[in-house]
Amino acid sequence: MARSTTRNSAFPFLFALLTGGFPFSSMPVASTGCASDLGSPISNFCVVTPNVLWRGAKPAQDGAAWLIQRGVRTIVNLELLHDDRRVFGEAKPASTGRHELAYFRISDWEPNAVIAPALLDDHVAHFLAVVDSRPKPVYVHCRSGQNRTGVMVAAYRVIVEGLSRDAAIAEMRRYQGIWFKADSAYIRSLSSERRYEIRRKAAAWMPKLKRDSRIICENAKCKVSKG
């Protein structure tokens, strides 16, 4: 009986890993010490680089409306399976002006930092290409805005902005992600040679970048279309 109970209790953990992380409602909200959160209703929201890159958790409908009202131009969803395009389609921004957003999916998985670092390199390169070439600010999120988001932001800070690996890891630590140890090891592995290779891959992504969806909001209503 005890063995069966152990198996049953382990199943939710394994399911969470396979589906891209624990439901955010079951995870602690990090105290990030973010210097600029703009009073956002979105958990773990932070302005990484003004007018360029924002980060946070998967937004609910009010969070999606807030992002639109604040002028976000591009969304990058890192979740493996979960899609939030419907949330943006149901958002009701208060402003009556016209807003257009590009929506990208980079389907990542927390264990990639351990079991598939080369694949994670490719995902980082894809992300860097989006941030470099698409309308800004870019909002990047996973489910909780801690682990997958933390890796992408830390890699961006190191590879693009020239922040030291130690400083990027210190920023990542503030979000208290359960994958912090593995994620920090990945960031430490970004040697100058590896950073060069990721930049090369990002450049190769440029001509083939294609948004997954287009979001247009007008008169407090939003519509999501493919491509």
Image: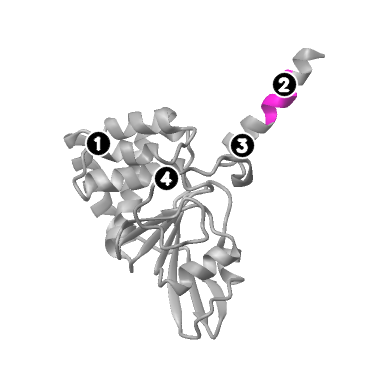
Visible in this render: residue 227? no
Query: According to the image, label 1 marks what residue?
Result: 165
Q: CA distance from mark 2 to mark 1?
A: 39 Å
Q: Are marks 2 and 3 in contact (CB under 8 Å)?
A: no
- Residue 219 x, y percent position in the rendering: 54, 86
Q: Amino acid at mark 3?
A: Ala
Tag nearer the camera, 2 or 1: 1
Tag nearer the camera, 3 or 4: 4
Q: Quadrant of the N terminus?
A: top right
Q: Amino acid at mark 4?
A: Thr
Q: CA distance from mark 1 to mark 3?
A: 29 Å
Residue 125 in the image: above or below residue 84: above
Mark 3 surroundings: few (<14), some (14-19) or many (≥20) residues within 10 A:
few
Mark 1 surroundings: few (<14), some (14-19) or many (≥20) residues within 10 A:
many
Query: According to the image, label 2 marks what residue?
Result: 7
Magenta highlight range:
6-11
Residue 32 has which mark? Answer: 4
